[in-house]
Image (tube, rainbow, N blue to C red):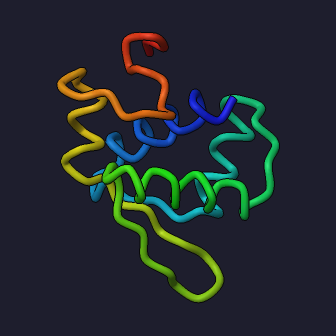
């Protein structure tokens, strides 16, 4: 589930005008659209993984973290690179 959730996170970040979203908002998105019922800390752990892989940058604001799409994350979505631990974009079409 984590590999698929990381792909979903990247896709949703890409759709945002500023390519960023808070962990609390992403948690709600995952629950309402994909029935992924995980605590905010789990979402933040996925943000951290994606940061370690160079797909996003993460900043802390108050009690939440904000992930912002980086170029490598966009490359993964376009199929130019494959990021270990993230489902390929072609495996889950919109």
Question: Residue drawn at (51%, 34%), measured in percent from left and top?
Answer: 85
Tell whether 51 sits left or right of 38. Answer: left
Identify whether 6 is placed above or below 64. Answer: above
Question: Residue drawn at (81%, 42%), measured in percent from left and top?
Answer: 37
Q: Name the image quarter holding the C terminus.
A: top left
Residue situated furthest front in the rendering: 84
Q: Position of residue 59 (x, y in %)?
A: 43, 77
Residue situated furthest bottom in the rendering: 62
Q: Quadrant of residue 25?
A: bottom right
Tell whether 44 sits left or right of 86. Answer: right
Taking depth in this image into account, of 52 and 34 the one nearest to the observer is 52
Q: Name the image quarter holding the N terminus.
A: top right
Question: Residue drawn at (59%, 62%), measured in percent from left and top?
Answer: 23
Question: Residue drawn at (58%, 51%), measured in percent from left and top?
Answer: 46
Q: Position of residue 86 (x, y in %)?
A: 47, 32
Image label count? 0
Taking depth in this image into account, of 15 and 23 the one nearest to the observer is 23
Q: Quadrant of residue 14?
A: top left
Tell whether 43 sits left or right of 48. Answer: right
Tell whether 16 sits left or right of 8. Answer: left
Q: Position of residue 39 (x, y in %)?
A: 80, 57
Q: Position of residue 81 (x, y in %)?
A: 23, 28
Taking depth in this image into account, of 92 and 35 the one nearest to the observer is 92
């Amino acid at each position: 589930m984590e590999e698929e959730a990381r792909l979903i996170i990247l896709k949703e970040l890409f759709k945002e005008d500023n390519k960023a979203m808070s962990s609390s908002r992403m948690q709600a998105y995952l629950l309402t659209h994909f029935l992924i019922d995980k605590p905010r800390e789990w979402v933040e752990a996925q943000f951290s993984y994606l940061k370690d892989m160079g797909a996003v940058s993460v900043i802390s604001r108050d009690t939440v973290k904000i992930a912002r799409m980086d170029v490598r994350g966009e490359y993964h979505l376009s199929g130019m690179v494959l990021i270990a631990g993230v489902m390929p974009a072609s495996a889950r079409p919109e």
